Amino acid sequence: MFSDTLIEKLNSASNVVALTGAGASAESGIPTFRDPDGIWKQFQPGELASMEGFRRDPIRVQAWYTARRETVLEAEPNAGHFALVRLEQRVPNFTLISQNVDGLHARAGSVCLLELHGSLLDSICSECGKDSEPFDVAVDAEQPAKCECGGLLRPTVVWFGEMLNPSILERAWSAAAEADVFLSIGTGAEVHPAASLPLVAADNGAYVAEINPRRTAITGIVNEEVSAPAGIALPAIVNALTAPVT
Ligand code: BV8
Ligand code: ZN
């Protein structure tokens, strides 16, 4: 499933970075975006995960995020999430960069976590920016959920066409540039700027391993393909590491 080289590199690494995408939550029952049964197969990204789509049909977008939040709150972190927590405890400097907005890494106990695309668990007002209780909107609702100021409530995620939080992106970029080992886990590596992070790591000499049952946009540039689900590969990789030097 994986090489001795990967284990040797992880055993001797100072800086390890993991980038996760929707595939890391697949074994928790959360649909991915671009797999055959993925979310984007039913909807166009621009329709639902963009300010234009939100303005065009706020009830539809709020109902979509309400349904996704309910799915996520019923889900549990999987063995891959927990293996990343063990890896974080095992290596000197570990940074987990996630594109996922489901909060499962935090629930599993990951500490050094950069949520590049925000979180669907929280809501804010799209006009005054005030934090709000999560909205709960059904697709047949008469009215969209609004703030006291009258502004529409939205999830605290980064939509297509929106800038990522500059300081979070900066921290992710420098972690990738300093990585000795970079693990790209469960991402199709199609969404930018996240998809550039494995390339930044590779350009700076990191050993890049991809953990994904399928090939992706970056499979051609990685040092190692671990063609297995994250929930199987990650625990096996962490179990293969030598015990930390105490
Ligand atoms: C921005 C939050 C500046 C919302 C999301 C440069 C080049 C090209 C395009 C662009 C570019 N710069 C900007 C763009 C446009 C755009 C973009 O990248 N478009 C793509 C589609 C071409 N990017 C943006 O708009 C970004 N903003 O750059 O700002 C700017 C500003 C104004 C104008 C221009 C530029 C913002 C991007 C963030 C969008 N928000 N999510 C929400 O989730 O509701 S992105 C969304 O996609 C999720 O975050 C998701 O995580 C992410 C990436 O998808 P993946 O995670 O990779 O999921 P996917 O389904 O694709 O793949 C799953 C993989 O898992 C598969 O490979 C599968 O094989 C694997 N898998 C399945 N099961 C398992 C598994 N792996 C392991 N184990 C398993 N069990
Ligand atoms: Zn408001």
Image (spheres, rainbow, N blue to C red):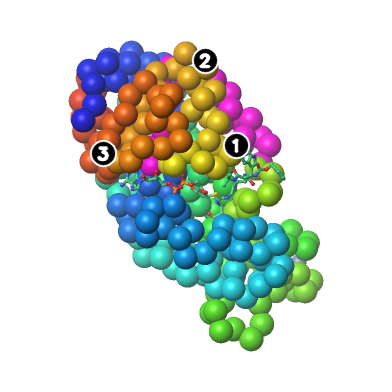
Between the C-alphas of marks 1 and 3, the distance is 25 Å
Query: In the rendered view, would you say 28 is above or below 246?
Result: below
Query: In the rendered view, would you say 217 is above or below 91?
Result: below
143 within the magenta span: no
Image point (70%, 74%), residue name: 146
Q: Please, what secondary structure does the residue beneath circle 3 have? A: loop
Can residue 62 be spotted in the picture?
Answer: yes
Q: Which residue in the rendered view is the most extreme toward the bottom?
A: 142
Query: In the rendered view, would you say 209 is above or below 19?
Result: above
Image point (39%, 18%), residue name: 207
Q: Which residue is mark 1?
A: 193
Q: On the image, which quarter does residue 224 sit in?
A: top left
**How would you rate the neighbour count of disc 3 (Cα within 10 Å): few for under 14, some for 14-19, many for 20 or more?**
some
Image point (59%, 70%), residue name: 62
Cβ of mark 1 under 8 Å from ligand 1: the answer is yes
Q: Earlier in the sequence, mark 2 or mark 1?
A: 1
Q: What is the span of residues highlighted in magenta in the rendered image?
A: 165-186
